Amino acid sequence: MPAGDSFFITTPIFYVNDVPHIGHAYTEVASDVLARWHRQRGDDTWLLTGTDEHGQKILRTATSHDVSPKEWADKLVEESWKPLLETVNIANDDFIRTTDARHETGVQLFLQKLYDDGFIYQGEFEGFYCVGCEEYKQPSDLVDGTGPFEGQQVCAIHSKPVEVLKESNYFFRMSDFEQPLLDLYASQPDFVQPASVRNEIVQFVKQGLRDLSISRASFDWGIKVPWDESHVVYVWFDALLNYVTATGYGVDQEEFDRRWPAVHIVGKDIARFHAVIWPAMLLAAGLPVPKRVFGHGWLLVGGEKMSKSKLTGIAPQQITDTFGVDAFRYYFMRAITFGQDGNFSWEDISARYQAELANGFGNLASRITAMVGRYFDGTVPIAGDLQPADLAIRETELRVTREADGAIERFAINEALAVIWELVDALNGYITEQEPWVLAKSEAQRERLATVLSTSLRGLGTLAVLLSPFIPEAAQKLWQSIGQGELTSQPIDRAAEWSSAPTVTPLAAGLFPRIEQPEAGAA
């Protein structure tokens, strides 16, 4: 997309039945990296995140803690979910709660329109319901239980028995949109990504869509159906609408037109809601569908998906307290192919921290700034005649900037970091080959020394710009050490065009200090 365009990106809104783990933080960081990159390109960027606070699961959890659902939600939002954003340094533009008045008003407006236009009717439904998923399950979504649930049918995701529910509910005519959705997937092949998720979604819709039960009368924790207050809105129908209620739907048309449609970053397990139900809802309302739905993979620990119910979740602070926030962000964006499942291990993050951050990038930054201080009293040297090795660094800067920007455009976050690291490696190799510490011993080599350090410093500044969305604290610290101000003011798609300041201040402490390897699972 050309720089200056609108880029509205969302995370899922997270369910407040428990505290966040690194799987939630992974989604937040990936969305934040994409938003920061586009923001620094000059795009009209908006990052939305928030919390999903209605539904039967929240009601049951709150009841088990002897508090009201709203009290439970307030506590979790303030003590766990908003602090998560600070823990991993998320620069979100908005935070929406489904208990916000703006959201509840927007949901009722949307629902009333669909009802008035004939897309909602009343009927009876009986089916297998998973409270954990807040979803009716198809028989194919169930597996045979084991252990205490042997002999029962359980949800394939939560491994807990489903309930048989029979209710008189309101239904959304989702079956009307089977062919329009297939036409959408065919006309916009990149609407659902990656390809593995897209193929699964297409196959699901081809099997035929049933109308969707969108209300509940068996409990009252939710948004009231405007024409029948004995019903509350189905939690997923309610939650999906946050993407438009947060951006002015029904109340601020100018803001809505400016922001919508969005790019949605979601876990692959909820891609079906976002790539089937959500666009069908929007088509019924006569609104544009999202630009893209990207279903990323799961974070695995010991080869198994993290789960609160199985107590395999890892709190983000367990990692940030040891390695720091930037290292957390770097590791999960570099080590895992965005769109595929990825394994987390303490050994891997420790190894990457030492090799890539402390020894690779951090040591490079310290060496270059220290040599400018030592050999030129902190004054930025002026390059003389450029040799092929110097020109190769310059060409690498330009190529890496271009290729990283292209990778971000494809949501290939790990590819962007990998290509940026080619410049880290190139600069480390360049310094080893040019041996500025040897050049410094000869006055006759003074101009060559200036050229080598000028070239190195320029590459280092380009790295600071390109790494800003990934490791914002370290990048800003480096940027200031080379005499610059606010890093985000340098357009990232022109990272190599930054202008040198007169002086450099050597880094007093390393960007990534060496640490002892933590014990697996250590807090």
Image (cartoon, rainbow, N blue to C red):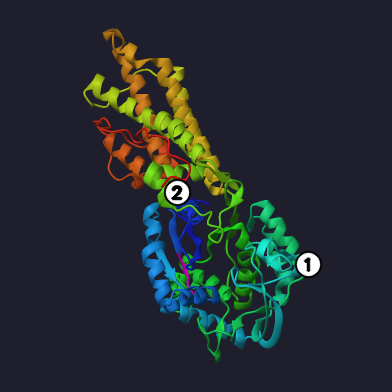
Is 51 part of what is drawn in magenta? Answer: yes
> Is disc 1 placed on a helix, strand or loop?
loop
How many numbered badges does the structure rendering display? 2
The picture places residue 434, in percent across and down from the top left corner, at: 40, 16
Mark toward the viewer: 2 or 1: 1
Residue at the image point whose x is 43% and y is 40% from the top: 466
In the rendering, at what x and y percent does residue 443 appear? 26, 9
Q: Is residue 206 left or right of residue 55?
A: right
Which residues are drawn in magenta? 50-54
Going by the image, does 335 lie left or right of 41? right
Sequence-wise, the earlier of marks 2 and 1 is: 2
378 left or right, relative to 314: left
Give the answer, above or below, for where 507 lies relative to 333.
Answer: above
Q: CA distance from mark 2 to mark 1?
A: 39 Å
Q: Which mark is residue 150?
A: none
What residue is at 39 percent from the left and 72 percent from the top?
74
Q: Which residue is mark 2?
A: 37
